C-alpha cells in the first residue's frame, strides 16, 4: 500500500480560540488524507479482484470489473478539466466513484449471465 504522509503541525502554547482555529485550518488536509487513503484502498481492492478474476471463466465478473474500471476512468477523466476550474470541486467529484461502483456492483448481480457460446 502506498505510504501517505500528512503534516498537521499546530503550534504549541496557543490559547483556546487560536488552537481551535488552527485545528479548523488543518481539517482540509485531514479530509484530503482520508479521501486519498480511501481511493488508494479501493484501487488496491479492485486490482486484487481483477487479478483474482483473471483465471476464472465467468463473463459476468469480467463485465462487472470492466464497468467499474470504466466508471473510474470516466470519473477521473472528467475531474481533470474540472480541476482547472476548481481543484477542490474536482477532488470532491471523486466521491462519485462510491455510488458508481456500488450501482455497477449490485446491478451486475441482478443481470443473468449470458448462456450463449463463449468466444
Image (cartoon, rainbow, N blue to C red):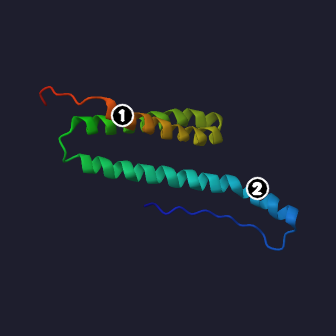
Asked whether, in this view, residue 112 is left or right of residue 39, the answer is left
Return the residue nearer the eye: 105 or 3: 105
Residue 38 visible at all: yes
* Count of numbered labels shown in the rendering: 2
Q: Secondary structure at mark 1?
A: helix
Residue plotted at (70% across, 55% down): 27
Q: Which residue is mark 1?
A: 67
Q: Which residue is mark 2?
A: 24
Find the distance from the CA under tag 2 to the CA under tag 1.
38 Å
Give x and y (percent) for residue 36.
54, 52
* 12 shown above or below 47: below
How crowded is the residue under tag 1: few (<14 C-alpha within 10 Å), some, or many (20+)? some
Give x and y (percent) for residue 24.
76, 56
Give x and y (percent) for residue 33.
58, 56
Asked whether, in this view, residue 9 is left or right of residue 70, the answer is right
Indicate the quadrant containing the C terminus: top left, top right, bottom left or bottom right. Answer: top left
Residue plotted at (84% across, 74% down): 13
User: Which residue, as the protein is rendered here, is positioned at the far bottom?
Assistant: 13
Q: Secondary structure at mark 2?
A: helix
The mark nearer the N terminus, 2 or 1, is: 2
Amino acid at each position: 500500500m502506498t505510504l501517505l504522509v500528512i503534516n498537521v503541525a499546530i503550534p504549541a502554547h496557543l490559547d483556546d480560540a487560536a488552537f481551535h482555529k488552527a485545528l479548523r485550518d488543518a481539517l482540509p488536509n485531514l479530509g484530503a488524507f482520508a479521501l486519498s487513503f480511501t481511493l488508494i484502498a479501493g484501487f488496491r481492492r479492485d486490482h486484487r479482484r481483477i487479478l483474482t478474476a483473471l483465471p476464472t471463466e465467468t463473463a459476468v465478473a469480467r463485465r462487472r470489473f470492466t464497468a467499474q474500471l470504466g466508471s473510474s476512468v470516466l470519473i477521473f477523466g472528467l475531474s481533470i478539466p474540472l480541476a482547472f476550474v476548481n481543484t477542490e470541486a474536482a477532488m470532491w467529484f471523486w466521491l462519485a466513484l462510491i455510488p458508481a461502483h456500488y450501482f455497477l456492483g449490485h446491478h451486475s448481480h441482478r443481470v443473468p449471465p449470458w448462456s450463449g457460446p463463449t468466444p
